Each structure stands twice: as structure tokens, then as C-alpha cells.
Image (cartoon, coloured by chain):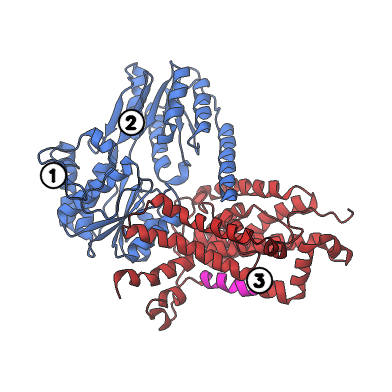
Chain colours: A blue, B red
Amino acid sequence: MNRRTMGKTLLGLAGAAVVALSVGAAAAQDKLKVGFVYVGPISDHGYSYQHDQGRLAVEKTLGDKVSTTYVENVPEGADAERVIEQLAASGHKLIFTTSFGFMNPTLKVAQRYPDVKFEHATGYKRAANVATYSARFYEGRTVVGAIAGKMTKSNVIGYIGSFPIPEVVSGINAFTIALREQNPKAEVRVVWVNSWYDPGKEAEAAKALIDQGADVIVQHTDSPAPIQTAQERGLWSVGQSSDMTRFGPKSHLTAIVDDWNGYYVDRVKAVLDGTWKAVDTWGGFKDKMLFLAPYNPAIPADVVALADTIKADIMSGKRHSFQGPVKDQSGKVVIPEGKSATDEQILKMDWYVEGVQGKVPK
Amino acid sequence: MNAELALIGPILAAMFAAATPLLFAALGELVVEKSGVLNLGVEGMMLVGAVCGFAVTVKTGSAPLGFLAAAGAGALTASLFGALTLGLLANQVATGLALTLFGVGLSSLIGQGFVGIPLQGMPKLNIPGLSDLPVVGQALFGQDVLVYLGVLAVPLVHLFLYRTRAGLVLRAVGENHAAAHALGYKVIRIRFLAVLFGGAMSGLGGAFLSMDYTPMWAENMTAGRGWIALALVVFATWKPHRVMLGAWLFGGVTIAQLHVQGLGFDIPSQLLSMLPYLATVLVLVLISRDVARIRLNAPACLGKLFHPDA
């Protein structure tokens, strides 16, 4: 619809105008200025909220040595470059750009400001002054998959996906492998809503999956709407990015929560010590970059014990989320016995494992 | 009954619910456009209604009060548009767009303290016996109260427009404001009231989303439904019952595409997500081929400024 796209573009422009107003908080000169760029509002109680928790942790731990600035609601695209540039130009020496779509803008600005250090989340392009970081979200999905395998009665799991990118596809696969290890009869049905955040559409997707027999709803989108829907229908759900228990106390099994606090504090310290390097960090449970929200009290003790064991095994390296043999949908062994998927295989994953219905949209 | 057929009932039920916010907003806009005013600020008014309805419900614990507040807030936002375009003769398209931007910002501001607060949804109106009917039971007799109110609003708007004197005057103002003015009708006042009604209906549509459909407040949660409502009015060639059919069609395609994905059919999800919009475009193209029909139904003074002295 013309009117619709026009509206969206204008919204983007308005967002940029708001952004321009909110930057520019001056701080004392002797402190290290650290900037954060968020794609959503910090009030989303999800992805951007978790990043901001990390910023607050930096302030709390290193309060007298740093001053922080954040810019929220930054659209992914040309506007991002201007926002990042503004932070760099106003004396920020370390800038975290926290969404995949900020990758190219970050690199462009980094070229013009070689003395400023940049950290880009979930991307893969680095430079002398650009480091990257992300969390192994799929590790959490392995634990959740095992829990779902034990909790489902209908043997149908509904999975709400945002975009068919490797991060989400590898999550679906990690989940399905663990699910079928506990319950070989269970299958996963995926519905893509092609959005990170659209409560209405996410609720509709949850309803559709439930109507098709799913009794556990898993989501890789950011709103708590699927949890509410599952609660209304008296079924199970799993939260995303942050603890969503309050939206469905009876339904919420657990949530995979991002935790950037430790990482942000470490990286700021590294700049202060002069030990900062442009490296790639991809941390999991072991590195405390993600954790699981408190389990629902309704989960039986043996299932909790199983989940804890799997988590401990992942942390100790005894278990890998993609441990061979892993078969794709046609039954072909992709990861042979005795091997596990390489990081590169996970980062480029564009196929489903056995047990997932449908095809990955190309 | 095989598995796919058993889904018809739930798909219908979800379709009626998905269509409801569109129905409210589009019916309101239809009345506004019938009076000769084009208000593109539907999305903004929906958002303001959504956040105010939610906030009042959280604070007072009363959903009826919440809906009342949502309608009031929508009307209040619309009055701003009315004052600018009818009073100060500002350009309607630009003002409407500005209203949407304003509504997005204002609703985020009001909603700051309300993000992440859960709210109990509205109870379903389960009519004993009838809601247990096979296939159509839940769809027709197990919906939320507001879904029925939305459907009920269609004949009411129709009766008002085509069977009452006030409706006739409103249409006359929309067709030829100079003539209506010459006959002694208060063009500005009538249009202003229509704009207020449109705002109230948009507010209700937004509140349905934040208080019932997904009972929570999130920034920008209408996610473009206001723009779809605007398209529906043209799609329906300014006829209330066609607005309803359009809303159902749109809701139905939205829900059906999610089911198709869940069933694992090998159709790209991006294409399926496009379907509701594609359907709208297709119908718009079909309608546009019939120029006479558009001429006959579109209010002749739509979007034109009016000044009593001119």
C-alpha cells in the first residue's frame, strides 16, 4: 500500500528527528565517554532493554571513570550512520552499536574516526577499531527444547519466527534436536511473521499454531503477545530476550534471557586499561552472556534436573547443541557422528533438521 | 472431518477478531470522508486511543472506562486535526500525516510508565449452547464483546448515513459544501463533528488492540493497521457493508496465511505475508477500472478546503 509505506518512511524520519534531539549530553572531560545505540526503545522490556541493563551495569561498576550516553529507537539504515557519527564526533571513545543492521554504518564511521573504538553486536565485519560480539542463543534453545519435549502432550510444538536468518534457523534446529532427543514423536511447526515486533501478528501466529494442535509455543520474536495467547488457551510458552513470566505466569515455562552486563563492563575496563583489541566474542552460558529465566513451578522436578544437566554439560563442553549425527529433513546426515557443527556452519545455517515441518523460506 | 477442515472454525473465529480494529477505524474514517474531509491521521489516533484506554484500565481497573477514555482521547486528537484543517484551513493531507507522527510520539510518551505491565483480556461472550455448535460455534457466538459491537456499528453507520436527515446533510456537505452552505448548513461544524466521530472510532480500534487482542501496551503496536483502514475505505467505495467485507477479507487472508505456513506448505512466507496487501491492491485495481463507480461514490468535495466567505 502506498499510504502505508509512505507512513513508514515518515515515521522513520520522525524517529530520526527525535534521535537528533536526544544526543549531545555533555560530560566531564576526564571520564571515558561510552555511547550506546539501540534499535528499539529501552522500554521494550526485551532486546534493547537488556542492552541498556548492560549500560547501567557499566555505570554502576565504573561510575567514577566513565560517563555513558545512549540513543534509542535508531532506524537501521542511513540514519544510523549519522547517529553513530554524532556520538564519535562528540568525544565518545567507545561506541556499542547493538543491532545487526548497524553493521555497515558502524564500519563507515569507524573509518573516519580511527581513534574511536567500536563494538558491533551480531555482525561479522570487523576492522582495526571495530570488534564484534554476540551470544550463542542457540544454547538456550537446546535446553528449552528438552523441556518442551517433556512437557508436550500433543507432540506438536508451535514456533514463531521473525526472519529466516541463520540466527533464527539455527535456534529452531537446536531446539528441534533436543526436543526429539527427549520425544522422537514430537514435531515443530514454524510460522514466520516477518517482523521482530508486531504484537498483533505474533498473537495471530500463536493462535494459528495452537488451532493446529500445538501445546507449546516458542518464539523468536520480541513481544510477549504469544505468551498471553498461550496463557489464555491454557498452554505452555517460552519467553524471548527477557523474563516474560508476568505476561503468563501459568504458561511461561522459562525464557532465554540475553545478558550483556559482564561483557560491557569487561570491554569498558579493557579500554581504560589500554588492553582493548578488535576481536570477535561469541559467548554462551559459560560466558554468562545468556541465562534462563526461573523455571515455571509447574515443571516436574525430574524435568528441571534434566534441564540443569543439559545446561551444565553445555557449559563444561561435554555437550554441543549440534552434536552429530544430525540429519536434515531429507534424512541426509549433515553433521556426522562424533563431530559437532563448526561455528561457521552455525552462522550460515539455512536448512532445517529432521522434525521441522515446511521449508526454510529463501 | 479431516484435520484441515477442522481448522475452518478457528480460522473464521480468528478472522473476525483480526478484522475488528480495522472495522472500527475504517467505519470512523468513512464517515469523516463522507463529510468531505480526508484525515490520514488514523494510525496516530489509534495509537493514542490504545495507550489511553490501556492506561485508564490499569489505573481504574475498569475496562468500560478504558474504552470510554480511548474514544475520548481519539476524539481529542482528532479535534486537533479539525482545528487545523477546518478552522485554520491547513492542508488536510499534510496535517493528517503530521497527526500520525504526533500520535506515535504522544502515545510513546504517555505509555512510558505502562510498558511491560500485563493486563487481563476481556471476557468472551460465550452464548451457552450456540458457542458449542460445530465449525461456526466459536466464530459466531464465542467472541469478545467488542467484536460484536464492531459488526453492529456497520448497520448503524449505514442507517445514519442513508436513513436519517443528519446523515443526508453530512453527505450533502461532502458532495458540495458550497451548496450546503448556501442552504444554511453549518459546514464547518458538521465536518468537525464527523472528524470527532472518526477519532473516537479510531481510538476504539486502537483500544481493542491494547486492551483485548494483545492486552498490553507497546510502542507503535498498531503496526500500520491505521493505513490499512484508510485503504479499506477506498476499497469499499465508501459503503459501510463493503468496509466490513473488506476488513473480513483482510483479516481472513492474514490468518489463513499463518495457517498455511503452520501446515508446512512450500510457499515462501514473505509472499504469504504480502497476500493481504496484494489482495487489497488487486481489489483497488478492479474497482478503479470502473471510473463511473468511483465518481458516483467518492464524496465530490473530499479533501477540498472550505471557507464560508469564499
Please state the extent of the stretch shown in magenta in the rendering. B146-156
Task: Tell me the chain of label 1.
Answer: A
Same chain check for tags 1 and 3: no
CA gap between label 2 and label 3 equals 56 Å
Q: Is residue B177 shown above or below A256?
A: below
Circles 2 and 1 on the same chain = yes
Indicate the position of residue A65 as horizontal and vertical percent values. Answer: 41, 22
Q: Which residue matches tag 1?
A: A325
Q: Which residue is mark 2?
A: A133
* x and y, in percent, of residue B248 in the image: 51, 66
Residue A336 point in image, percent of width and height: 12, 40
Q: Circle 3: is it few (<14), some (14-19), or many (20+) Cα within 10 Å? A: some
Chain designation of label 3: B
Question: A222 or A69: nearer the eye?
Answer: A222
- Residue B10 lies left or right of residue A1; in this view the side is left
Which of B81/B151 is in front?
B151
Q: Residue at x 65, y 62 (%)?
A: B290
State the residue position of label 3. B157
- Name the residue type under label 3: Val
Crowding near the residue tagged with mark 2, few <14, some 14–19, many ≥20 C-alpha atoms within 10 Å: some
Give the amino acid type for the residue marked by disc 2 in the picture.
Tyr
Which image quadrant is residue A50 in?
A: top left
The answer, for residue B1, to whether it is visible in the render is yes
Q: Residue furthest bottom?
A: B129
At 55% from the left and 65% from the top, the residue drawn is B246
Real-space Cα separation, disc 2 to disc 1, in angstroms:
29 Å
Q: Does dot 1 land on a helix, a strand or a loop?
A: loop
Q: Are marks 1 and 3 in contact (CB under 8 Å)?
A: no
- B95 relative to A256 in the view: left or right: right
Where residue A206 sits, quadrant-wise, is: bottom left
Residue at 79 percent of width and 61 percent of height: B189
